[in-house]
Amino acid sequence: MTSKNYHYFIVTKKPRSVLTVNPGRLCYMTTQKYNAQQETTKHPKTLSVHAFDSFTNIPKDVEISCLEELSLEDAQLLLAVPDDTERLSMFSDQPAFQAARSLSVGTAVTVKEDGKNLRGVIRYIGKRREPPYPDPISGTYYGVELQGSDRGKAKNVGMYSHETLFQYEKDCGILVPISRIKPVVPSSLSPSRTEPSGAYSDPQTDELSPGDRVIYFIGPKCRSGMVVEVQQQNGNQMVWISTDTDEMGRRGGEICIPLEMVSKGDIPGDITEPERIDFDTTPPEDYTNLDVNSMVEVILGKRNSYGIIRWIGKLPGREETMAGLELEEDLGVSDGTFKGTRFFRCPNKRALFVKLSSCHPDSRFHGSADDHKQEMSQPDYTEMDEDVSGENLEVVPPISAEQIDHLLIGRMKGIQGHCNSCYMDAALFSLFSCSSALDSMLFKTTTSQDAPIQRTLLRDIVIPLRSKGFVECRHVMKLRQLLQKHGYSRSFTTEEKDPEEFLIVVMHHILALEPLLKLSAAGKVQESYCYQIFLDQNHSLVLPTVQQLLEHSFHNAGLKLAEVPSCLILQMPRFGKKFKMFDKIIPSLELDITDLLSEGPQQCIMCGHLAVEECADCFKDPTFNLTGFKIFCHKCSTQVHSHPKRRSHQPTRLEIPKGYMGRSIPQTLIRDRLELYAVLCIETSHYVSFVKYGPNSHDWIFFDSMADRQGEMDGFNIPEVHLCPEVGTYLEMSPAELANQVPRDMKGVAKRLFCDAYMYLYQSTSMCLYR
């Protein structure tokens, strides 16, 4: 299928139905599915789209009101922009976007790189690689050869290898997305030039460009600033300037004035300073351990403020080593620029440049001072972990039912949450607290690049959780920072994500774990790490069990299991708070997957003899039970399909293993079952988890990584784990009794399990590491 057989979209506002799809994300769907959805629903409210670079190929139902369709060319241009916010900003500024779209090879441009505006000429427009599976397209990039005084400034510049894409002199080639490139705009300071701007090919002229220092005149006053943009307004060329000071003496504003009132240059001896803020100048015990991505606090006036170091270096006119902070609150003075030069990127009013010696490690994280210096200062993790590569770590088994009360129950137990980490906290707690189903990922051989992530997961999270019953939030943040540092997402340390995206990043992209799930469809085997349940619109389920949901989804998709999975991760048919397909779902403590296997002997549902036929048409026949595939021996199939209502059915032959043919009753047949061990739930945007820790129906615990909080902005979250035996009480009820239960009247936290389930985790007990 070619790239033209798709529809492409950009998310223009936050969807209510999908919590982790942010404005600016690009999505796509096949033209075939798009047309089918338009035909089946007259006025569809959502589209089932795939998000680019989501690490999963699972479609998300996004409201049409939040989507705007793109042409193939625009989708390719925007896909190269690495950040959702930057991408949406680029798309929203249509004049600038259309101007950039018109650029061609040979056009003189300015390129933003490391906060500087470099001049050059476009030498290449195209893709840098083939589309990564399963995305249908890749981004369009611009290859620029630097010119004039900026020649040679491309040393170590650029994320991608582009030597083979276009020719350029040594250290003069840069490959950038559309958001970082602008055409050179001519200035009236060069009156002899009358050609249109597109005709300029010599980048060494005296044109004004974004980032140029200029002086301008307001009446008799001469002031200075930095060019932000030059644009046409009502036939006149106007210059947007980021002012050093405005007519009232205030700093950091913007002004738009005619081009003839502007001149390149700076006021002699004018060294502007940012607004003075009272900083705590008492140096921490060892601030030299702080590095980029360290979580720190500074004292602004009489209060503590918190943020993350995004840049460290020297600023113009300053001798001290400075740190560029991204603050948690709007207490900063810019979006990562200083005197018009960009040093990093963050939301406006969140950036603040301070002396590195004024920064302290974030004190909200619990631990000793030595722990803070070692862990929160964020040294180079690769080097640090190489030093302990020979360390023999004690293997700690999951917490047993006998250990639960004294080891795991109470406040400050489980995993401490911080800064939108609940999706990761709940997933890690569910996977590793009381189960070893995925412990193989902790010990398998991995690359030296990814070994620090695996070691952090084992040493700093799993082992403390199982041995002490508590993991400090700084250890989870360390894991998030390592994931971000390795390039898997720019927002792992700040934004909430889907648990399945996090799990697939770790299992597939980092640890290269063998896929947990192998599905057989039409004789072909597909591999995956989790399974999203989808149902057609004609299902008859009202209060389903997980067993019924899985069977109906497999039946609808024509799937079978190619083998018994060691761990089965199931996503429920729901998309956010208001898009749940079912008000309640009954947890199946066991999943009988015998009839879901593509190979193996199976029993006739009527007489128990060896089954030889399966009837997909009988699956939804109300005569039969709603649970289980409808498989028959030859005699029972003949009788069942002799009924007038079922004569049109078309049973299919089952694959019977050799050695079972000729047997009447497979008396030694063992049913293949998986047991439930954890459930992730979400209400609005907060994830919690339930874990079944023992064999009895009442052996349930509930975990919330942010159950309470100590203090306000300078405080910390208090995680809690407590017993919830009431879950077992409801599980013992009949479906009719459960249907009559009013969610708000259900005891304890049971309502959250039955009504807010997002992901179910099942395991094969025969494959657990410690059993």
Image (spheres, rainbow, N blue to C red):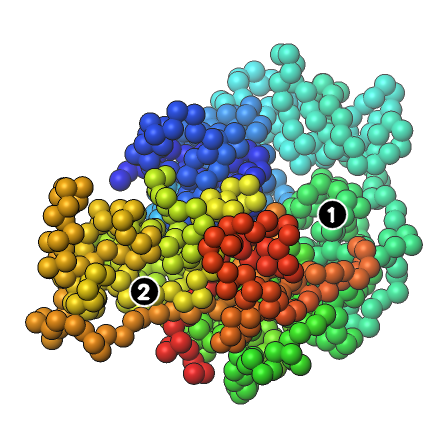
Q: Which residue in the structure is indicated by mark 1?
A: 351
Among numbered discs 2 and 1, the one appearing first in the sequence: 1
The answer to whether the residues at label 2 and label 1 have Cβ atoms under 8 Å apart is: no
Q: Is residue 172 above or below residue 471?
A: above
Q: Position of residue 392 (x, y in %)?
A: 53, 87
Q: Position of residue 577 (x, y in %)?
A: 57, 44
Please name which of the two marks, 2 or 1, marks the residue nearer to the observer: 2
Q: Is residue 493 visible?
A: no
Q: Residue at x 8, y 71 (%)?
A: 662
Q: Which of 371/767 is in front?
A: 767
As helix, strand or loop, the secondary structure at mark 2 comes to loop
Q: Residue at x 12, y 48 (%)?
A: 642
As helix, strand or loop, the secondary structure at mark 1 comes to strand
Q: Position of residue 531 (x, y in %)?
A: 39, 56
Q: Is residue 493 above or below residue 149?
A: below
CA gap between label 2 and label 1 equals: 54 Å
Q: Residue at x 69, y 60 (%)?
A: 706
Q: Is residue 592 visible?
A: yes
Q: Which residue in the structure is indicated by mark 2?
A: 593
Q: Which of 54/576 is in front?
A: 576
Q: Where's the C terminus, which quadrant?
A: bottom left
Amino acid beneath label 2: Ile
